[in-house]
Amino acid sequence: MDYVSTRGAAPSLDFEAVTLAGLAPDGGLYLPAAWPTLSRDEIAGLAGLSYVETAVRVCTPFVGDALSEDELRRLLASAYAGFSHAAVAPLKQLDERHWLLELFHGPTLAFKDVAMQALGLLFETFLGRRTEHLTIIGATSGDTGSAAIHALAGRAHLDVFMLHPLGRVTDVQRRQMTTVQSPNVFNIAVEGNFDDAQALVKAMFNDPAFAGKYRLAAVNSINWARLMLQIVYYFYAAVRLGAPGRRVSFSVPTGNFGDVFAGYVAARMGLPIGKLIVATNVNDILHRALSLGDYSVGGVEATAAPSMDIQVSSNFERLLFDLYGRDGAATAAAMTGFEASKRLDLPPAMRAEAAALLVSARVDADGMAEALRRTASECNELVDPHTAIGLAAAWELAGEVEGPIVTLATAHPAKFRDAVERASGQRPTLPMRAAGLFDREERYATLPAELGAVEAYIGERATPA
């Protein structure tokens, strides 16, 4: 399997190289040169398989010869051995049509663990072959950082620098990052919002001298391997609800577009998805893009769903690449224009092509709170604010989509205790695997959202390649 950049000017890479690379040197994002497909019989054959075995069959076409099937199976079995539910990603029924896909049974109580626990092992495996050192740089709006740190802390050949927006993540999210005392982990609180932190990460990757000296790699969803691992749970859930014999729709709380793009890839691979509902909060650039063609940056509004407080959705570029007919030059021109003007217009034909699979909804704070209350009162289920936004969108658009609707439950409600309590009157408790979180010492640096300051901090601590 070869991987190409969305901007068309970077060399193609194999799976091992693309996992270690992250962002392409031309500023684009890597994705497969062609989408692999699973036949109807192959999809039907996933019925009754464990999550690990499902992952082996879904991921094998992307991995190519970078890992043998047995190596991949052992790696995935190790990645999910510590999850608190034997199903890894269990389905929970809410009513006759709506389901939750619980993706928060990993060590940091969020869906990012599903990919990150395996990605950490991929890094360790590939770096062990090469005896090279990587500097992992990431930006987090809350959950990516803690998942990455827990997956990579203490691993050989790696330093981890994670940027989060100061004061814009919950106390649980912050402490899951800053109380990890491993000597290869460094947390940076950026005086700005998530988009500022993400822009700093991209700028470091696009600084050839800095990126080359420290051999930068990514763990957020610009890294293709992360998205590949998220494709699996779409197949796992859909098959349990009747695929390929019937279509299944999904509602996805969306910020950076990575999780929903994984569903898009599942559909391109042959999974019969009715619709993918792109559920946004008031930071609604994706809803405006898909419904109006208006992909323009506004101000970021802080909400009770901080992982969605984003105005530049990095993975949207991967969808644009397909919508531009996989023309790297056209995608590069569009993204260069967007980066300069903070605006990109999607013509009607392009929106219509996207609408064959993707629909969207905008859910404000009142809608989120009402969905959270409704789920608690009618279904006896507490959900976190992001999942509540997904459920609100699923209920709003239920008449427009086909089949059962699975809302991705992206985090345990205890990660957002204050917001859940305000809406439902019930305060969720942290599960035992997070016990002691508030007794541990925190360690992080606070820096301005300036490239020079962040590079200087990293340069003093990172191991040169």
Image: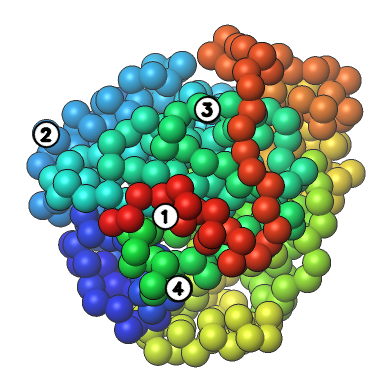
Is the residue under label 3 in contact with that under label 2 (CB below 8 Å)? no
- Residue 405: x %, y % from top left: 58, 42
User: Looking at the image, is mark 2 or mark 1 nearer the viewer?
Assistant: 1
Res. 278 visible in picture: no
User: Looking at the image, is mark 4 or mark 1 nearer the viewer?
Assistant: 4
Residue indicated by mark 1: 218
Looking at numbered disc 3 in the image, what kind of residue is underneath it? Val
- The span from disc 2 to disc 1 (Cα, nearest Å) is 26 Å
- The span from disc 2 to disc 3 (Cα, nearest Å) is 32 Å
- Residue 438: x %, y % from top left: 68, 18
Residue at 53% of width from left, 14% of height from top?
A: 433
User: Looking at the image, is mark 1 or mark 3 nearer the viewer?
Assistant: 3
Q: Earlier in the sequence, mark 1 or mark 3?
A: 3
The vertical placement of 323 against 413, above or below, is: below
- The span from disc 2 to disc 4 (Cα, nearest Å) is 38 Å
Residue indicated by mark 2: 70
Q: Earlier in the sequence, mark 2 or mark 3?
A: 2
SS at mark 3 in the image: loop
- The span from disc 1 to disc 3 (Cα, nearest Å) is 19 Å
Q: Earlier in the sequence, mark 2 or mark 4?
A: 2
SS at mark 2 in the image: helix
- The span from disc 4 to disc 1 (Cα, nearest Å) is 14 Å
The vertical placement of 245 against 422, above or below, is: below
Quadrant that contains the N terminus = bottom left
Residue at 23% of width from left, 59% of height from top?
A: 17
Looking at numbered disc 4 in the image, what kind of residue is underneath it? Asp
Residue indicated by mark 4: 207
Q: Which mark is residue 180?
A: 3
SS at mark 4 in the image: loop
